[in-house]
């Protein structure tokens, strides 16, 4: 009887872990940053890394050798098409020295 209770508790433990959190995983696991014209017209030169992360979130690619943050930006066009642009922020002494949008 004692072994039966132990087995029952083990089964309940493992089954409860599987139903606690059911998430849908999608192929698009990267968070998209949607832009507007104000984001493109803003001058980011002189901003710190913390300010950039506050605005855009954690960068998709952080190049530590060249000290660059890369962000994918998305814009919905009027004909329901998605336009993708890359924002590249180059840092020097923990501040943005230059940036470009491709």
Image (cartoon, grey):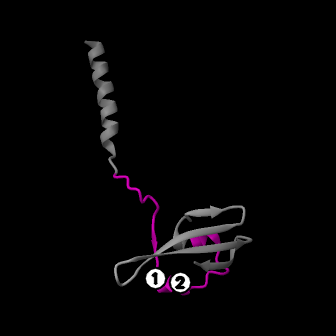
Q: In which quarter of the view is residue 102 placed? A: bottom right
Please provide percent x and percent y for residue 32: 45, 68
Q: Where's the N terminus, which quadrant?
A: top left
Please provide percent x and percent y for residue 11: 30, 27
Q: In which quarter of the view is residue 95 placed? A: bottom right
Q: Is residue 97 left or right of residue 56?
A: right
Q: Which residues are magenta?
A: 24-53
In the picture shown, does residue 77 fall above or below 90? below
- Name the one closer to the observer, 78 or 50: 78
Please provide percent x and percent y for residue 41: 55, 87
State the SS at label 1.
loop
Q: Residue at x 58, y 73 (%)?
A: 52
Q: Return the mark for residue 40.
A: 2
Residue 5 inside the magenta-drawn segment? no
In the picture shown, does residue 20 fall above or below 65? above
In the picture shown, does residue 50 fall above or below 41? above
Q: Residue furthest top?
A: 1
Q: Residue at x 57, y 75 (%)?
A: 87
Q: CA distance from mark 2 to mark 1?
A: 7 Å
Q: Residues within 10 Å of mark 1 (few under 14, many from 20)?
A: few
The answer to the question of whether label 2 and label 1 lie on touching residues, with beta carbons closer than 8 A, is: yes
Q: Residue at x 52, y 67 (%)?
A: 57
The residue indicated by pointer 1 is 36
State the SS at label 2.
helix
Q: Is residue 65 left or right of residue 72?
A: right
Please provide percent x and percent y for residue 12: 29, 30
- Name the one closer to the observer, 68 or 45: 68
């Amino acid at each position: 009887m004692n072994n039966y209770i132990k087995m029952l508790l083990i089964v309940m433990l493992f089954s409860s872990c599987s139903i606690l959190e059911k998430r849908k995983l999608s192929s698009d696991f990267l968070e998209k940053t949607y832009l507007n014209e104000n984001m493109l017209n803003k001058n980011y030169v002189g901003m710190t890394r913390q300010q950039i992360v506050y605005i855009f979130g954690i960068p998709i690619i952080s190049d530590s050798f060249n000290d660059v943050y890369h962000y994918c930006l998305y814009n919905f066009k009027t004909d329901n098409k998605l336009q993708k642009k890359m924002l590249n922020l180059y840092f020097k002494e923990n501040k943005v020295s230059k940036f470009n949008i491709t």
